[in-house]
Image: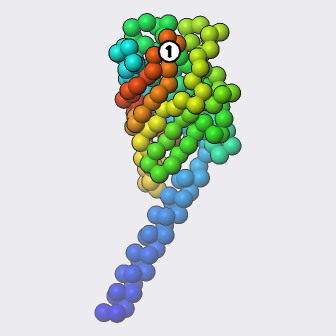
Amino acid sequence: MLRARLIRTLAIASICSLVAAGTARAALIFPRLVSAFGGAVDSADHSGSIGIAGQFSSSSVNIVLTYEDSDDPGDGITCTFKNLGDLSIGVGILTLTVAASDSCFQTTTPSNSVSNAGKSISFYYFPGSAVNAGSRIVGKSINLVDSDANTIEDQTVVGTIQP
C-alpha cells in the first residue's frame, strides 16, 4: 500500500514537472507573431474596425495597428509600435502603448501625423499551455485618437499570439 502511494506520488510529480518544463519552453519561443481584428466605436459614435499584425521578441517589437472609421475613411490611423517598452505583458493583461518616438499617422495621408503618445490599447491575455502554444487576446480598453481627434473609446478586438 505504501509502495503504491509512493509510485503514484512520483508519477504525479513527474507529470507536473514535464508540464511546467513544457510551459517554460513555450514561453521562451521567440519571435512571437500577433494578429487581431475587431470593431471599435469613437467618441463621435462612429463605428470602425481595428486590425493588428506584427511580431515581437525579447529584443524587438514591430507591431502595426490600423483603425478605419466607417463614417469617414479619412479619420483612419495607422500606428507602428517599435520600442520594447511599447509592449507590456502582465498578469492576464497585454498592453500596447504609443511612445513619443513611434509613428502614428492618418492612414489615407501618411504625411499627417496623429498625436497618440502615451495612449494605449489593452487586452485580456490568456497564455497558451504546453499543449496549446498559442495565446489568445480579447479587447479590454482603448484610448487612442483617430485623425479627427475623436477618442476611440470602445473596442471588440480579438486575436492570437503564436510562436
- Compare residues 90 and 1 and report the one nearer the observer: 90
Residue name at image x 60 percent, y 27 percent: 117
Closer-to-camera residue (122/137) = 122
Task: Assess disc 1: are there few (<14), some (14-19) or many (≥20) residues with their C-alpha within 10 Å of its C-alpha.
Answer: some
Q: Is residue 53 visible?
A: no
Q: Answer above or below: position of 93 versus 8.
A: above
Residue under the image location 30 percent in, 93 percent down: 1
The answer to whether residue 63 is left or right of residue 129 is right
Colour scheme of the rendered structure = rainbow
Look at 69% across and 43% down and name the residue there.
59
- Indicate left or right for 156 with 19 as reference: left
Furthest residue in direction left, as rendered: 1
Question: How many badges with numbers are in the image?
Answer: 1
The answer, for residue 101, to whether it is visible in the render is yes
Q: Tell me: residue 24, above or below residue 51.
A: below
Looking at the image, the residue that sits furthest to the bottom is 2
Which amino acid, by three-letter code, is at mark 1?
Ala
User: Where residue 160 appears, x then y in whole percent?
Assistant: 45, 38
User: For the residue labelled by badge 1, is the local secondary structure a helix, a strand or a loop?
Assistant: loop
Residue 7 appears in which quarter of the rendering?
A: bottom left
Percent coordinates x, y for residue 126 in the rendering: 42, 47
Using the image as rendered, state which of residue 59 and residue 20 is in the foreground: 59
| Image location (x, y in percent) of residue 95 | 51, 38
Report which residue position mark 1 lands on: 149
Quadrant in the picture for the C terminus? top right
Task: Residue 98 in the image: state x and y as whole percent.
Answer: 59, 30
Asked if residue 9 is positioned above or below residue 70 in the image, the reply reads below
Residue visible at 34% across and 88% down in the picture: 4
